[in-house]
Image: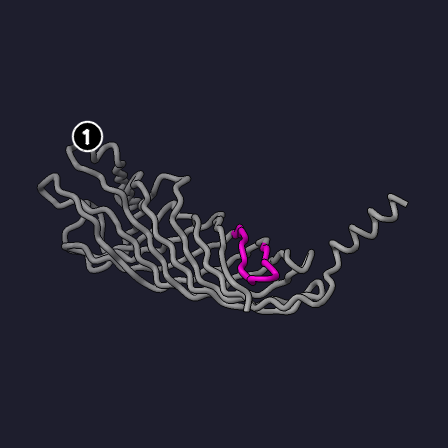
Amino acid sequence: MSRRVAVLAALALALPAAETVVADLRFGGGIAPLPDEAVGTYLDVGAAPPGVVNGSPRIDTYQEDAAAFAFDISVTHGTLAPVGLLYGCSLRYCNGDMNLESIAYPDSGIKDTAASFERQGYQVDSNSWMTIGLAGHVGLGWAITPDWHVEAVGILGADWVTLDTFSVVTGSTDTYANEGSGPGWTYGGRVGAFWTDSETMWQFGAVAEWTTTEGTVKTDYADNSVEFDVEATGLGLRLVVGRRF
């Protein structure tokens, strides 16, 4: 008898009493990946390092394992009985700092490290990375119980990307950050688990996503310009609070 009761209890947990309609507004905050490097091409070269001409490459690298602050506002809709299609969109924001590791000019064989700049008396400040964009998501949800459900969705969206890059003022020990902006896009996937109070309809959850954000920014320096291709790929984690309508 006890075995039969256990089986019935497990079935009751696995099968919601009715369809679960997902109509959720959510606010999420957590961490997101930062770029490891920015690969640039020199444009409109005036004064520049030896051997650098129009079309010469520049590679800025950053210390790894740093994370940015991430925030999003999303809406998700669908019907789970107990499995169903989910779809929606989100406004996404990310902002974080990266410590410069090196600047390399492959055509001239020059590579300056942050340590070498500091030995010369320069103060090397961190660079910053910021993205803001709109992304759509679509995938599957599973209502484990009337209050609990899980999701697995794909993500695709457009972004505006801003990157600060390090520069040295020629003939002095001054340094400064130069801001470049440009278009980008984000793609990847996300899984999440959510609990919704059946009386108040307030919702709490957690999500993990693996995404890539790519962008192209043009940075104007005092005597030249560089167009950088930059990419941030990795794991993002967020806690979520929301409400079902």
Residue matched to label 1: 119
> Observer-nearest residue: 111 or 31?
31
> Observer-nearest residue: 13 or 158?
13
* Quadrant including the N terminus: top right
| Mark 1: amino acid | Arg
* Residue 223 visible here: yes
- Secondary structure beneath label 1: helix
Taking the image as shown, residue 197 lies to the left or right of residue 39, namely right
- How many numbered discs? 1
Residue 163 quadrant: bottom left
Taking the image as shown, residue 81 lies to the left or right of residue 155, namely right
Residue at image coords 36%, 39%: 63
Q: Name above or below for residue 160 compared with residue 62.
A: below
In the rendered structure, does residue 205 fall within the stretch colored magenta?
yes
Taking the image as shown, residue 68 lies to the left or right of residue 22, namely left
* Residue 136 visible here: no
Give the magenta-colored segment's residue range: 194-209
